[in-house]
Amino acid sequence: MLTRRLFLGGLSAAFAAGPRKLFAKEAADFDDNLLVFLSDVHAGAAKTCKHARKKLKEAVGEILKMRPLPRHVLMFGDLAHVCGLGVDYDASRPSFKLLEDAGITVTIGMGNHDRRSEFAARWPEAPKKSLVPGRFVHLVETPHVGFLMLDSLQGTDDRAQDDFGPVPGALSDDQQAFLRDFLVQRTKPVILCAHHAPKEMKLCGKPLSLVVVTTPCIAGYIHGHNHRWTRAWLRNKDQKTPERAKHVLGLPSNGLWGDIGYATCRVSPGKAEIAPTLKDFWLSRPVSAERRPPEWEDILAEDRASGPCIFRL
Ligand SMILES: [Fe+2]
């Protein structure tokens, strides 16, 4: 007969063996070379964010069903709706906690609609792990390539609650100094990641695009901000032979406007292949089939047909 004492004794013995044994996923459940990229989630607390919140829950549900699970989820900024309010970060935190509870590492970048102090209050580990104090700069290492998430948010925390701050991106001076030193020392391939595209940013006086194409360890650049699945080739015409070309990839928004979806990155020796999961296209909001402009279908079809984007490592 199972007495209360025996039952509790058995339970405590099981926990003494370690709760990980009971609940944790095994290493084989994860693929260290599989990552998911979200961007421009904008899952704030406002009524107007209801589609964005729904799409975040949907994406998280799909990620949790992947087998094996991705080791990492990277989010490329604009987690908040417009002004980086605390209630916005409260609204999205439970969805990301589901990923973390499953053992997936979540790394969040800063977009122009974010606010560092409100974010940090809900994500206290982020500032502790940042490579640049006062900014959120994180290196996500995988076996064949690293992903360096830069912080291109210019807006400061002392701005008014209803001030969404400057739209363009920039790297702070101390972040530029960090990146310069990092690139000098780095030999393993790295893909630079940020909310903003490289064409609007500089590193120590040089266009960041030029730095990307001329620095041997940089395999390419991934960004959000434009809410479109776009790719371009960077090249340096002044370079002597052989001339390298490197991809700049723009990610869809997970749920606000533009291309709606996320991307999956599979890394193997020599390359990272990034494929879009495009759910929809809309501008201010989804509309019924009867009211849906035909161009939206064309855009979605064209984007889906564009296929994966390959980064050579
Ligand atoms: Fe955005």
Image (cartoon, rainbow, N blue to C red):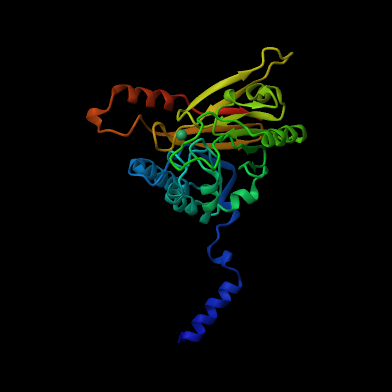
Considering only vertical position in the picture, is 238 above or below 157? above
Residue 234 quadrant? top right
Residue 35 quadrant? top right
Q: Nearer the viewer, residue 293 or 304?
A: 293
The answer to whether 121 appears left or right of 162 in the picture is: right
* Image quadrant where one finds the C terminus: top right
Residue 102, x across and y down, in percent? 51, 55
Residue positioned 43% across, 47% down in the render: 88
In this rendering, does residue 311 appear at all? yes
Residue 40, x across and y down, in percent? 46, 37
Residue 204, x across and y down, in percent? 70, 27
Tally of numbered discs:
0
Considering only vertical position in the picture, is 253 above or below 5? above
Q: Nearer the viewer, residue 217 or 257?
A: 257
In this rendering, does residue 69 appear at all? no
Residue positioned 51% across, 56% down in the render: 101
Residue 49, x across and y down, in percent? 36, 42
Residue 153 quadrant? top right
Q: Residue furthest right?
A: 185
Q: Residue furthest left?
A: 290
* Image quadrant where one finds the N terminus: bottom left
